[in-house]
Image (tube, rainbow, N blue to C red):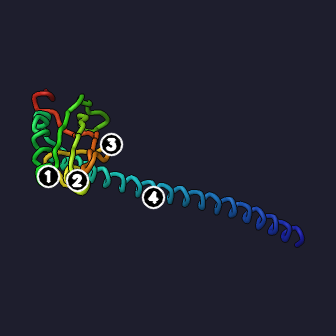
């Protein structure tokens, strides 16, 4: 009888160790499955985000003027300046090339003179309310000159190449 009890005890000990190892394997499999499910969820969100990015990129492409329209930038700036009574001079400088999926751009400089509040209004109109051009300002310097102020701003104006350039 002692031999049966010893055999039963050894079997129970062996089964316990085997069950513990099996439980560990099951736990590892469940953790891996949860990690895979999490990865799939992240990939699904990334795919959804890429579709949103594509939509934004299409909308930006529609907003961007063609390169030839940059010729009209100077007259557009003068028209915007006439509202707040600012005198303006501008210079379109070298062109940048499109890279890494970003649109092409050209640098520009604006020199504007007028009352301080008129200059601020002019710059807000250019930077945030423009429907003709996509502009980013990189530097601005305002100096007082007697009873008026002078603003010198440098930035970029973005555009898309004409169809003939892409062919």
Q: Looking at the image, is mark 1 or mark 4 nearer the viewer?
A: 1
Instruction: Report the residue marked by disc 4.
Output: 37
Query: Sequence order check: which comes first, mark 3 or mark 1?
Result: 1
In this rendering, would 44 be left or right of 146?
Answer: right
Q: Looking at the image, is mark 3 or mark 1 nearer the viewer?
A: 1
Instruction: Report the residue marked by disc 2.
Output: 115
Q: Residue furthest right?
A: 2
Residue closer to the observer: 158 or 3? 158
Q: Are marks 4 and 2 in contact (CB under 8 Å)?
A: no
Residue closer to the observer: 19 or 101? 101
**Which corner quadrant holds the N terminus?**
bottom right
Residue closer to the observer: 129 or 23? 129
Q: Looking at the image, is mark 4 or mark 3 nearer the viewer?
A: 3
Distance from label 2 to label 1 (Cα)? 8 Å
Q: Secondary structure at mark 1?
A: loop
**Which corner quadrant holds the C terminus?**
top left
Q: Secondary structure at mark 4?
A: helix
Distance from label 4 to label 3 (Cα)? 44 Å
Instruction: Report the residue marked by disc 1.
Output: 85
Query: Sequence order check: which comes first, mark 4 or mark 3?
Result: 4
Q: Residue 12: which quarter of the image?
A: bottom right
Q: Looking at the image, is mark 4 or mark 2 nearer the viewer?
A: 2
Near mark 4 (Cα within 10 A), the count class, few <14, some 14-19 or many ≥20, is few
Instruction: Report the residue marked by disc 3.
Output: 138
Near mark 1 (Cα within 10 A), the count class, few <14, some 14-19 or many ≥20, is some
Residue closer to the observer: 86 or 159? 86
In this rendering, would 151 be left or right of 74?
Answer: right
Q: Position of residue 93 (x, y in %)?
A: 23, 30
Query: Sequence order check: which comes first, mark 4 or mark 2?
Result: 4
Query: Sequence order check: which comes first, mark 1 or mark 4?
Result: 4
Near mark 2 (Cα within 10 A), the count class, few <14, some 14-19 or many ≥20, is some
Q: Position of residue 144 (x, y in %)?
A: 30, 47
């Amino acid at each position: 009888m002692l031999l049966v009890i010893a055999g039963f005890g050894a079997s129970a000990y062996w089964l316990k160790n085997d069950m513990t190892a099996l439980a560990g394997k099951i736990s590892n499999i469940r953790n891996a499955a949860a990690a895979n499910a999490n990865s799939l969820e992240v990939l699904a969100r990334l795919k959804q985000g890429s579709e949103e990015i594509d939509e934004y990129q299409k909308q930006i492409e529609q907003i961007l003027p063609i390169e030839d329209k940059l010729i009209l930038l100077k007259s557009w700036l003068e028209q915007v300046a006439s509202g707040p009574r600012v005198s303006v001079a501008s210079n379109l400088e070298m062109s940048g090339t499109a890279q890494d999926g970003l649109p092409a751009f050209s640098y520009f400089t604006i020199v504007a003179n007028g009352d301080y509040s008129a200059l601020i209004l002019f710059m807000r109109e250019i930077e945030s309310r423009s429907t003709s051009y996509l502009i980013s300002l990189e530097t601005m310097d305002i100096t007082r000159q007697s009873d008026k102020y002078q603003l010198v701003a440098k930035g970029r104006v973005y555009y898309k190449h004409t169809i003939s350039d892409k062919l």
